[in-house]
Amino acid sequence: MKRTHHCNELRPAHIGQTVTLDGWVHSRRDLGGLIFIDVRDREGRTQSVFDPSDLPKDLFEQAAALRSECVVRITGKVRARPDGTNNTKIPTGEVEVMASALELLNYAEVLPFPVDDPEVASKVNEEMRLKYRYLDLRRPEMVRNLRVRSKAATATRFFMDEQGFLEVETPILFKSTPEGAREFLVPNRREPGTFYALPQSPQQFKQILMVGGVERYYQIARCFRDEDQRADRQLEFSQIDIEMSFIEREDIYNLIEGLLKRIWKSTLNIDVLTPFKRLTFQEAINRYGIDKPDTRFGMELVDFTEEFRGSKFKIFAGAVANQGVVKAINAKGLAGVTQGQMDTMTEYAKSFGAKGLAFIKVEGGEWKSPIVRFFSDAEKAALTSKLAIEEGDLILFAADQWLTACEILGKIRLYCAEVLKGQGKLSVPADRFDFLWVIDFPLLSFDKEQNRWYSSHHPFTAPVAEDIPMLKSDPKKVRGQHYDIVVNGVELGGGSIRIHQPDVQKMVFEEVLQIAPDETKLRFGYMLEAFRYGAPPHGGIALGFDRLIAILCGTPSIRDVIAFPKTAKGTCLMTESPSPVSARQLRDLHIEVKAARQEPPAV
RNA sequence: GGGGGCGUAGCUCAAUUGGUUAGAGCGCUGCCCUGUCACGGCAGAGGUUACGGGUUCGAGCCCCGCCGCUCCCGCCA
């Protein structure tokens, strides 16, 4: 390598040294008689000067012909910049390289979009950024995201190693287990009609590793789910996947708190306070209307079920009489909500099953609301005191079954917070991270359509020991030893203590979940068999690695922290995948495509 | 599968709500310029308004279809 320094390295201490820099032409300022070339690499940029008075004519002309993003090697002596010409915006701004040699390593054609101007580049259409991802990745913001990702991965590996974990890789070609997410299938050439599946997660392998005596396993694992995408969901994504033997829930909490503390310290140099708060599922729903609450602001749900029992306002009284609840939130300072925003909120509430969205605007010293005339003085007094109502407030109500009412207001709460942030009435510091554990989830949920119970998390989750007797008598009340780690309203990960007794697992499969014994054997037979030969008590967790990095980088989309992400429809705009394949490939795989299909280009 | 937003020059955006030859900034090309760093100055090129239909005397704008990007619901054990 001929490069002597990177482009964020030269300081006044280097003055007098002859150096060689390799990089891209970040910008070229041709003053006619004098040319400035800023050379950029992933570390930063450095100014070089081409002065015709001490350069051969052809060298000077070569420099004049350079254009943005050409790859160059520049050699020259480091010198202090003349008085008054320092550039305080860049760390190398006190010095410059007086070029004596220039090598054009590669020429660059005119770019489809600029990478040198952060203002413009950050606004470029994402379609363009994805198609020319290699250009997008040159932007300092993107380099920084990749660096944070790498640092976090390294911190994870160091920490997990210190804690005695073994990094073990598990197969990508897995067995189809049609529970949960839709899988990607891979046809087996060797036996027509059989398929591998790509793993939704290494769940079953990591439990088998515990049976295999590994005791402490981790992996930054690639997972695949053929479901529709979101800003925080890709078809393929990464998890920090962890499993441990001979432990209880507290051990997982401790471990993860230590891991996140380490990651935050090594990437952002922020000290995260531990232990994290804990909230039961019940309390999370009751206070925030969601199982992944953002606790960086208040606006909590307040219960008025007792106050409106027998109220003259029949909608509220009726909900209570029907075993439902009445809940309200105070969106402080939002009385000036526009009709459009109110309509949006009402539509939003309706999409979650509400019949409408009752409200009170507190403006000009009075309560403006179509429903307030039905309220008694006692009811008004209760609202005023429990919601701390003041001038300028907007009160919003939901009356329904407990879970529905809470979820509706939970969504409305988040919407109001966004509106208030937009108006500058609510601000959340960018470096604030509210971590918390959500615990005591119900083990089972009931599927009304299929008239059967299904696992809230997955069927290997252990019930809380004291609740086991209720498994058959009162399944609804059984709590699972499941936990979610939440930060700033984002579900960062979740896990559980697993069932390690084959008889309990069999009972859950067959008697609680009502999966036929032969089907259980077909799908999970190898697991049940493994558990017969001495399975240690164990449990684990998986953290969404992409989401974790997105939070560290302060971006709402995980596409910004994945080098080569896919679009919302699952395509790669750079490589144009997925794509048709040749008839011969299909024949080898014993696959006949019935849908009208595009022919691949002839090779 | 459903709902919303967007698509105009290489890029980011305008276009007085259906009316002349579709504009600006940046970029690009040429010329000038010895202390710039968002260099500056002068001149110039660059458009199938994503695509296909329709309504109209007239469509970037209205209608239908279609493609792509994006956000959300469903889905994600």
Image: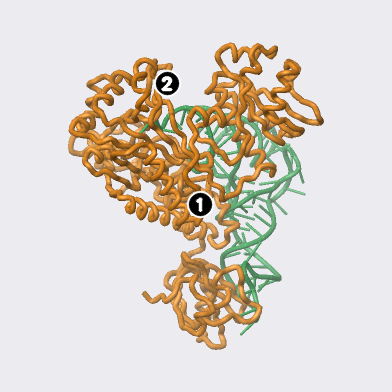
Instruction: Return the chain for callout 2.
Output: A
Chain displayed in green: B
Asked if marks 2 and 1 fall on the same chain, the answer is yes
Q: x and y percent of residue A444 in the render?
A: 39, 23
Are there few (<14), some (14-19), or many (20+) residues within 10 Å of tag 2?
some
Q: Could you tell me the amino acid type at mark 2?
A: Lys
Q: Label 1 belongs to which residue?
A: A553
Element class at badge 2: helix
Residue located at (53% from left, 43% from top):
A434
The numbered mark at residue A95 is none
Q: CA distance from mark 2 to mark 1?
A: 40 Å
Element class at badge 1: helix
Q: How many marks?
A: 2
Q: x and y percent of residue A35 in the render?
A: 57, 77
Q: Label 2 belongs to which residue?
A: A477
Q: x and y percent of residue A58 in the render?
A: 49, 83
Chain displayed in orange: A
Residue A135 in view (yes/no) = no
Q: x and y percent of residue A575 in the render?
A: 39, 50
Residue located at (31% from left, 40% from top):
A202
Instruction: Return the chain for callout 1.
Output: A
Q: Which sits in the foreground, A370 or A74? A: A370
Mark closer to the chain start, 2 or 1:
2
